[in-house]
Image (tube, helix red, strand yellow):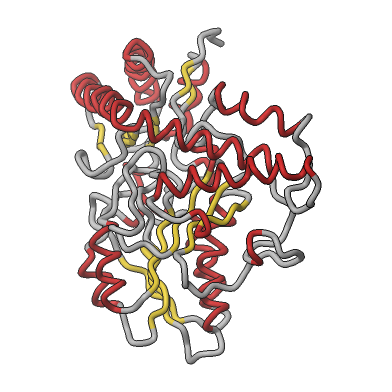
Amino acid sequence: MSTRIIYLDHSATTPVDPAVLDAMLPFFTSGFGNPASIYSLATDARTGVEGSRKQLAAALNASPDEIVFTSGGTESDNTAIKGVFASCASGVGPHLITTAIEHHAVLEPFGTLAHTGACVDIAPVGSNGIVDPEDIRKLIKPETVLVSVMHANNEIGSIQPISEIGRMCREAGVLFHTDAVQAFGKLPIDVKAMNIDLLSISSHKLYGPKGVGALYIRRGTKIGRLLEGGEQERGRRGGTLNVPGIVGLGIAASIAMQRMSLESETLKAMRDRFFDELLDRIPDVHITGDRVHRMPNNVHFCVKGIEGEPLLLALDMAGICGSAGSACNTGAVEPSHVLTAIGLPTNVARGAMRLTLGRSTTWDDLSYTLDVMQEAVSGLRALSAIP
């Protein structure tokens, strides 16, 4: 086992930025008050929460009162989808639309609602993992109440035409939700210009703490609440607020906004160089997703003739942390729904590998990773029965 650690799984989670941790620490000790109380100790906590609300709003070109804090991306997605349904469930057969490559935090709520009175349509995607807005348009009906399309896919990194879909939904009078868990802090987002009504955020994807996120809800959007039990967040989400986590999320968002442009260009250059050398050094590698319209840090590919998991273990033995797909699918035997949706044959999809770069990644890390992979793939192919 190597003593060298190279972390290439930033789409699964990220380390907490030291500046984020420094900002959080006082709210565990001297500033521990409940922000819903009225004494001065609580005022400090409330000031921290409202400061974070302003930071997120600034990052989205939103108003602070349109930001609702949650426990993370899964709760934000569930609240957006189920909340819209709850606000109109007394109507006749609410219709909802999503795509075939969404995160399970979107697909599973859609599946639940399909069993409780909703009519659900799943739009296909192309082989590059991108949905055609015209396919969304064709599915919209008079009874459509919500379209949910992720901004960037968590596995293959494909970036969706969010602005075009948002404009289409606004023209049709349909609410538009986007799961921006992977995109927020890495891609520019303007909820007004993009006609977004609901948007999900998760802190731990952008060097903030785990267990906290946010949901942008455009002012005037009718939405039922998922968590009851208190009047926190203007009655939109019950429960005592995670003050240290919320403060950390705000700082993480501010840092991401400041660094986004330079960071994106740096990661994109390393990503493209890695792809070029990968194709040159290892035969029969299939790059998944679009080479251009993809997250700047996403390196997802399939190695024909082997299983992804043994390759992942070989990388781990060399101190390299990667993934065979989404962290939420770890342990699954069959190829992910994303790879199935883009039409990959099973014998190719089983060799899936996702490496996602981050602030600490260097080209030396990636060069070493290529060396390890080249040797590991050669050995695994010699042992593999996969054609």
Q: How many marks?
A: 0
Residue 252 image point, x, y percent: 50, 34
Residue 346 image point, x, y percent: 35, 48
Horizontal side of 356 relative to 309 (left or right) equals: left
Q: Nearer the viewer, residue 250 or 228?
A: 250
> Which image quarter holds the C terminus?
top left
The outermost residue toward the bottom is: 92
Residue 126, placed above or below residue 210: below
For image coordinates 64% across by 39% down, the residue present is: 245
Residue 257 image point, x, y percent: 39, 35
Q: Which quadrant of the structure image shows residue 237?
A: bottom right
Horizontal side of 170 relative to 243 (left or right) equals: left
**Residue 332 seen from this side:** no
**Residue 34 seen from this side:** yes
Horizontal side of 292 relative to 79 (left or right) equals: left
Residue 300, placed above or below residue 313: below
Residue 278 image point, x, y percent: 25, 23
For image coordinates 34% across by 17% down, the residue present is: 366
For image coordinates 69% across by 27% down, the residue present is: 25
Q: Nearer the viewer, residue 379 or 46?
A: 46
Q: Nearer the viewer, residue 46 or 5?
A: 46
The outermost residue toward the top is: 3
